[in-house]
Image (cartoon, rainbow, N blue to C red):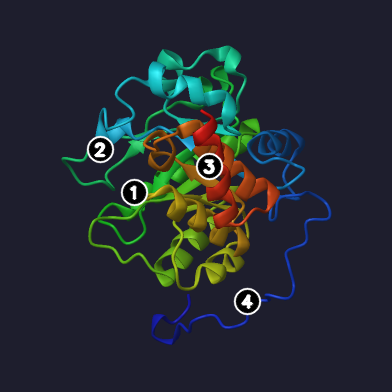
Amino acid sequence: MADLDDIKDGKDWGRDRPADTSRFFLKGNAHQDWGMKARLSQVFRPDTGRTVMLAFDHGYFQGPTTGLERLDLTIAPLAEHADVLMCTRGGLRSSIPPEAGKPVVLRCSAGNSILTELSNELVSVDIEDAIRLGASAMAAQVYIGAEYEHKSIANVVKLIDAGTRYGIPTMAVTGVGKSMARDARYFGLATRIAAEIGAQFVKSYYVEEGFERITLGCPVPIVIAGGKKLPEREALEMAYRAIDQGAAGVDMGRNVFQSIDPLAMLAALAAVVHEGRTGAEGYELFQDLKAKA
């Protein structure tokens, strides 16, 4: 085992040598089987290699927060405008019409709430129910450095093993405890661990300093979380910087469903993620669409 006293920060990130995607458009997934690749191609657009995911799984530990009071009224009308839906099975079955026809990344962890230790989760969805729902991918939190780190890693490993048997990819979500540092060193550690245990893609946070090192050091795609609600201009600028520094998409919730115009925000995010618009150009589009609405 490596000597913990002699761990050195990485230096050679190979910025001038992009990952080989000649055999499959998503880095790190060329050796997956046909079914896994087919589902990854539902989550990520093959023409751009990127995705705009709409996250509305917050209620599984936060309850009915602003914008999620009525999923049938606030989220269902947005579904057709996102590339992918990120949600719980309860939210999906109760509120999203099956004819929406959108790929689903299914939240498969639970067991905690905002009143308890966030890292104390369990696997809450059996693989058979994920298959029954037609999930394109499954997702669970991994809490590196938290009280229940080991348990959270075991949860993700369980999903990866079950998903591999049936060709369903797993997205590991880097959860952050209340006292953890949100910096490149932490997220570099968390995302790399997630990839090394077998996650086909990872959801993490954007950081101002060193984000490119996080994406370069993670051998599978990273999509960024939106985090807390930001002004639309700032959220679009964050999305642009993340894509520019190697992210493969965004998985945003509050920055969409709490926006003053959620449909315009989704369209602006798609322009930034898929069309290469800058944050400023995305915000200009958002303003134009909001005015027309």
> How far, Cα to Cα, is label 4 from label 1?
30 Å
Residue where numbered disc 1 is placed: 228
| Above/below status of 243 relative to 167 | below
Mark 1 neighbour density, 10 Å: few (under 14) some (14–19) many (20 or more): few
Q: Position of residue 279 (x, y in %)?
A: 55, 56
* Viewer-nearest of discs 1 and 2: 1
Residue where numbered disc 4 is placed: 13
* Viewer-nearest of discs 1 and 3: 3
Callout 1 amino acid: Lys
Callout 3 amino acid: Phe
Identity of the residue furthest to the left in this view: 115
Name the N-terminal-most of marks 1 and 3.
1
Residue where numbered disc 3 is placed: 286
Mark 3 neighbour density, 10 Å: few (under 14) some (14–19) many (20 or more): many
Residue where numbered disc 2 is placed: 112
Name the N-terminal-most of marks 3 and 4.
4
> What element does badge 2 sit on?
loop
